[in-house]
Image: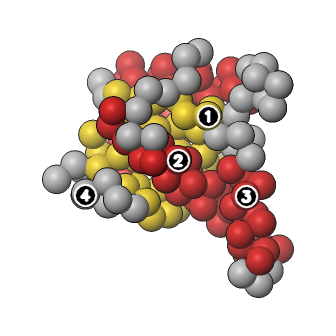
Amino acid sequence: MRRTLGLDIGQKRTGAAITDELYITAQPIGVRERTGYKSELAWVMELMEKYDIERIVIGYPVNMSGEKGERAQACASVARKLKEALGLEVVLWDERLTTAEADRIMKDAGVSRKKRKKSVDQMAAQLILNGWMAAGGPRAKGVAE
């Protein structure tokens, strides 16, 4: 059964999570330092093969005002490139405050600042996927660029 890959693309790191096969839960699967598009594409292709990915949901960091700033534009650009390179459905999903929420959850759980820094992006990717699944998963409509 196929799964969906969620990505939280930050300035320095990209976090990844996947859905389970029944689209009930999402699990974090890793964080990677951002070193360029070709390297990220190779990583995504590895994840696709390992987890039988059928679509990608990318966090779309719209400002609280609804404005699409520089980070949102960068994520939209990566989404377009992945869709073209991989031939998969790529959904942009409003991710306002997911990184802050992931950091708060980890802080409340007693995770040290150093460990939070290393894993907050994959937890943010998990929260992005959870939000997408709660909105209907494969039937959910993403954010228009």
Q: Is residue 78 visible?
A: yes
Q: Is residue 59 left or right of residue 65?
A: left
Q: Amino acid at mark 4?
A: Glu
Residue matched to label 2: 131
Residue matched to label 4: 21
Residue 22: image quadrant is bottom left
In the image, 93 versus 41, the foreground residue is 93
Q: Is residue 10 left or right of residue 58?
A: right
Q: CA distance from mark 3 to mark 1?
A: 14 Å
Which circle marks residue 101 in the picture? 3
Q: Position of residue 120 (x, y in %)?
A: 68, 62
Q: CA distance from mark 3 to mark 4?
A: 25 Å
Q: Amino acid at mark 2?
A: Gly
**Along the polypeptide, which appears first: circle 3 or circle 4?**
4
Q: Is residue 82 above or below residue 57?
A: above
Q: Position of residue 106 (x, y in %)?
A: 71, 73
**Along the polypeptide, which appears first: circle 4 or circle 1?**
4
Q: Amino acid at mark 1?
A: Asp
Q: CA distance from mark 4 to mark 1?
A: 23 Å
| Residue that appears at 38% across and 40% down | 136
Q: Position of residue 90 (x, y in %)?
A: 42, 29
Q: CA distance from mark 4 to mark 2?
A: 17 Å
Task: Give SS at disc 1.
Answer: strand
| Residue that appears at 31% across and 54% down | 23
